[in-house]
Structure formats: structure tokens, C-alpha cells
């Protein structure tokens, strides 16, 4: 029995999105917590978005949010989650002098997520993800070593052999520069994935992502599975 | 087909409890294992309690056990578990010169657990936990930096943004001192949580815990979930 | 709707096996990825086997594969997986100058797995595994500190207390030398397990494994569960 008063009035709550994602704001973060996050002195407010299922998706959405607001990325933390799946959960913390900027960043991030999950394909055995932005910014730089301002892509495949074949296909398909390589014991939270990120001309990055997706989906299908795009209706 | 002889006679088995918890004792631990655990020379016996679902719960129960027995805490190890959930599993190892002390510690810990889970609320998206003791001892000192002898509390929230809002509410509600801050990449086993511990006057600690629980449950409810207390009947 | 053309033609795909295992080969691995794996210059080809559920199983199967081929072990990486269970997933990367050697290694590994899972027992609360080889080779040396050429065994139990009792039973049952001890925070990917490996005379290793299995299954049964051998039919 939940009374209305228990759900009706939480000013810190901003909203939810696909992937068991929740966004909150704290206008004047407690001083002890500010120190733990090593916030710069001018930042009194934070916005925080956490998801049970996510990683590249949320880094992409956070990147769009910082490009459109005065909030900055204070911290991006990956965890081992996906609710029994093979991949990550994630938290993104925005910081700002004025809480309206953090709130705006959280709102934009939540709005962007549906689109960022458009190229996430899941099945019982694993998943395949590709992510693209025409211009990488602060969030992708922090989380995936993106050179800011350049066209940028991420490929993710699970189980890890799927991700390796995607990585190989991506690097061979286009004239791109690899910015990050992550596997179960390096650069992930012990997920069953191989993840790479790369940058280059927009056309080359897109070509590499397309080749990676095709390779990844082909492995999952050869395993006997039928990976489907993940949407909030699922 | 399990024959009686297969289950009927295992002197090391002590019992079970909520959270897929099992307790055992080993009267005279093998020398190689004693070295791995770095047991003091006088300790020949261990008790060990492992759980698929637990963390603060089991540290609290272990604390009650060491206060009531001659067993000591040899090791507390957190793992990433909760059977697909967002949090920890845990193992507690007691050591003693006489096996009866380790057995007694395991028995007390198993008995205490039902009570320690009283303030664990779960739903499909995450969980909210608060834990209180009037006087922290060895287990809470080892696992959560508790100052021994003081009133002490722990807050846990998942997904991590839930835990952050709980932490902020706790620190603002009472005149307490924060003893530990843990998040997905610091001090946890890559869980999707923010955890803090704090100490102070009993009334202040309780006030902070109450505020944290209210904040955490409100976020989960605003996400559209109905978190329920976890009991062994569930 | 999957068209035939999407699944019919992926030369890199080798096959699948129990434990959501998939095996692939890449004849001429991209140079960036070769550097990330620190492959020796003569190795242009890799084979890669990844599993959602596995660990000792796959190290054993990989050991059989390297003994029978010219492929070498380039990397073995454990992750936290088992699809919500208490244990590991794993990836094994073979390297060879000629892709036929990597392909052969992957094929042998996939064939061996059914047999390697013969002594994996699972139930809702955890699992018990024992693994034996008469002669350890490169894969077991890399992943479990096996002395090459000797009879060698591995015990795994979850929740961790099950594994501890198995380890104690194994070390007491036979005149074996312990080669590795791993627990939630040391040597595992934060799994809820205790794992040991040991070597010695074949008879002693077998005796220790048998005692460990009996102890582990007895704990799970005393917990009220009925652990069953894991097979590809399950």
C-alpha cells in the first residue's frame, strides 16, 4: 500500500528511461559527498543518472547533454550489471554551479537514451551494440578516450568473442584510429565483452560501425539466436 | 534421487538463513588454507558464512556474533552477486582456538540475519537498505570503517543514484560523521550502488537512517516500483 | 525475420558448445588488436572461445586443445558471469602462424567441453565443480598455476563456504600440493566462490577431487537443494 504522499513529492526526482535508468538532481550536495566526488569549489549541484543496463548508450546520451548545457561531467562509473546479462550498468554524475543546469543535463540525457539504444541488439546469449556521434565531447572523452570534436564510434559485443570479431571488422572496414580497447580483465567491470572505440572521418567511422554490427549479429545468429533491437517497449 | 546417507551426516554443516546464506565450521583447517587466510597461530578452527544476497546485513549479523563469542573476524569478503540483482554477496570467516567458539559465532550470525534483513527493501529495479547498531564492533570496523563502541549506521541504495540521494539525505538529517563512502568503482565489487556508513549519537544515527530510507524508497516508487521488505518467506 | 544470407556465410564462425560457448577464428587479426593482445610477431591468426558459463571447464578444454595442436595460448580472461549465477564466464584466445592451427584448437576445445562439464553440478543456490587432467599443459599453467606435465586438479564451490569446505576436504584427502587459492577478492572476478588447484600423483589428485565433490554436494544438499550435473541438454 503506497500512499500518494509517498510518491507525490520528491523534488530531486527527474525521470526514468529505458534500461532501468533513473535521473535525479541534488541542488546543494552535502559537503562530505562533494569531497568524495572531488567536485570543483564552484559546483554545489549535481545531477546523477544511473542505469541497470547501459554503458556506451549512456556515455553517448551524456555527451549530448553536456554539449547542450553548462553542466560538466564530474564522474562516469561503470559497474557489472545488465541484470544477469553479460555487460555493464553505469552512473553519470553532472556538476554545475546552478541546479537548473544539472537538471537540464539529466533531462536531455534521459530524452536521448531511447535513441542511443536504437543500435543495441540483445538475445539470451549476449548482445551487440554500435554507437555513433558526429562530434565527441567531454563524456565520451572521459569514458572512452574520444578525441573531442571528431566523429567517433564504439562497438560492443558479448560474449567477448563476438566483440572481438566486431572489433576486427571495424578496424578493417574503415580508415579509423582506435582510441580504446577493453576486455573482461582490462577496462571493463569484468564484463563478458570486447569493446573498442575509434575516431576518424564521419564516413569512415560509420562504415566501420556498420561492418561491426553485421559481423556481431552474424555470430549471434550462427549461435542460433535472434538478436532484437532493445526498446523501452521490450 | 538423494539417499539419506548423502545429506544426513555432515558435521561441518551448521545451518542456513535468508539470502541463500549457508554456515559451516571446520574444526582443524588444513595448514595450506590457514596460511592463505593468514590465521594467527592459535586459531585452528574457522566458521564461515557465505550468502548469495547480502553485505551490510551480514556485517551487522557478524558484528553481533563476535560481540557474543570468543571468535574473531578473520576475513570479510564481498563479491558481486545478489543472483542477477544490483548488489553484493558476502563471506564472513570467523577464527577461534576452539571450534565451539566458531560454531557459536556462526549460529548467532545465522539467527541474527532475519532481523538484519528487516530493513532491506527490494524491487525489480533495485534495492534500499538501512542498518543500525547501538555499538559497533570488530566486523563493522573491518568491513565499513566503524569506530568501535559507537552507534553506527549504513545506507545502501541501488541503482547508484538511489544510494546517492540516500547518502545526501542521511548526512543532512543528523549530526553524524561519515566513515565510509563506496560506489561502483571504489570500495564495492562493481555493484550498482552508493553505500555510506556513519557514526554519532544514537538518536542522530537513527534520524539519518530514517531520512535515508524515506528518500531511497521515494525514488524507487517514483520509478514506478513497489519495494517490499525482504524476508525468508519471500 | 532472419534471411538465410545473414546466417549462412560467416567464415570466422567455428561452432558452439555447452555454457553458451562460441568459438571463432580470425585468419589475419587487425594490427591494432594484435598489439593489444601482445601477440608474438609470427602469430597472425587467432582462435577465440568465449562462454557465459565456464572457468575451470574451459581451461581444461583449452589445455587439451593446445596439447593436440600447434596453437598457443595467447590469453585467458575470466569475467563475472554465469548469467546471474555465482561464478565466472571465460574467454580463451589461441594464437598461431597458420589459421588452420587456431581453427583446429577451437574445434578441439569445443568438442572437449561436453566432457569437461561432466563434473559440474548446479542448483539454484550455487555450484560444485571438480576437474582432472593426467598431464597439465599451457592453458592450466597460465590460468591455474599448474606445473606442466603433472597430474592436476581443480575444485570450485559456490557459495564460497561450499568451496572452502571442498578445498579443506581435498587437501586432507590426498598427498597433493596446492598450486592456487582463489576467493571472492583474490584471483577471481568477484565471484562467490573458493577455488583451489593442486597437483601430485594421479591417484592422490583423484582421491582429493572425489573427497571435495562429496563434501561440496553434501553442503548444497544440506541447504535443501538437489545439485544436478550440467549438460548441453539442460
Image (cartoon, coloured by chain):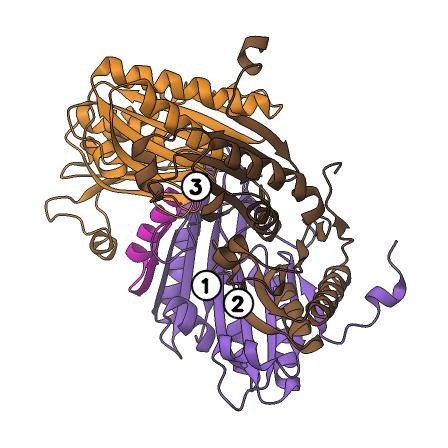
Chain colours: A purple, B brown, C orange
Q: Read off the residue under disc 1.
A: B186
Disc 1: CA contacts within 10 A as few (<14), some (14-19) or many (>=20): few
Q: Is residue B209 above or below residue C125?
A: below
Image-based side of B38 in relation to A40, left or right: left
Alpha carbon separation for disc pair 2 and 1: 8 Å
Q: Position of residue C126 (x, y in %)?
A: 53, 31
Q: CA distance from mark 1 to mark 3?
A: 37 Å
Residues A56 and C222: in front is C222
Q: Nearer the viewer, mark 1 or mark 3?
A: 1
Residue B201 placement: quadrant: bottom right
Q: Position of residue B25 (x, y in %)?
A: 49, 31
Total numbered labels placed on residues in the image: 3
Residue numbers of the magenta segment: A158-185
Which chain's residue wears label 1? B
Based on the displayed image, in which of its 4 quarters is residue C145 positioned? top left
Labels 3 and 2 in the same subunit: no
In the rendered image, residue A215, in percent from the top left (x then y), is placed at: 40, 46
Q: Which mark is residue A218?
A: 3
Q: Is residue B90 shown above or below C118?
A: below
The residue pinned by badge 2 equals B181
Please report contact status of discs 1 and 3: CB closer than 8 Å, yes or no: no
Mark 2–mark 1 CB contact (< 8 Å): yes
**Residue at point 39% right, 29% down?**
B28
Please say whether residue B121 is visible from this viewpoint.
yes
Tell which residue pokes out farthest to the left in this image. C42
Verify whether residue A173 appears in magenta.
yes
Same chain for the residues under marks 2 and 1 in the image: yes
Amino acid at each position: 500500500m503506497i500512499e500518494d504522499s509517498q510518491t507525490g513529492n520528491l523534488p530531486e526526482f527527474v525521470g526514468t528511461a529505458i534500461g532501468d535508468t533513473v535521473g535525479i538532481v541534488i541542488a546543494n550536495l552535502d559537503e562530505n559527498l562533494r569531497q568524495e566526488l572531488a567536485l570543483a569549489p564552484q559546483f554545489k549541484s549535481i545531477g546523477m543518472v544511473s542505469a541497470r543496463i547501459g554503458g556506451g548508450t549512456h556515455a553517448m546520451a551524456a555527451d549530448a547533454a553536456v554539449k547542450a548545457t553548462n553542466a560538466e561531467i564530474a564522474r562516469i562509473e561503470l559497474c557489472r550489471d545488465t541484470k544477469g546479462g553479460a555487460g555493464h550498468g553505469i552512473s553519470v554524475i553532472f556538476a554545475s554551479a546552478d541546479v537548473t543546469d544539472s537538471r537540464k543535463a539529466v533531462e536531455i540525457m534521459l530524452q536521448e537514451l531511447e535513441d542511443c539504444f536504437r543500435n543495441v541488439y540483445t538475445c539470451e546469449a549476449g548482445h551487440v551494440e554500435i554507437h555513433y556521434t558526429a562530434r565527441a565531447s567531454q563524456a565520451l572523452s572521459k569514458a572512452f578516450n574520444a578525441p573531442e570534436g571528431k566523429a567517433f564510434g564504439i562497438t560492443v559485443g558479448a560474449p567477448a568473442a563476438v566483440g572481438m570479431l566486431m572489433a576486427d571488422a571495424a578496424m578493417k572496414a574503415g580508415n579509423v584510429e582506435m582510441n580504446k580497447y577493453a576486455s573482461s580483465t582490462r577496462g571493463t567491470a569484468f564484463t563478458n565483452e570486447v569493446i573498442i572505440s575509434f575516431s576518424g572521418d564521419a564516413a569512415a567511422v560509420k562504415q566501420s560501425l556498420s561492418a561491426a554490427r553485421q559481423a556481431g549479429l552474424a555470430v549471434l545468429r550462427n549461435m542460433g539466436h535472434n538478436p532484437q533491437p532493445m526498446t523501452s517497449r521490450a
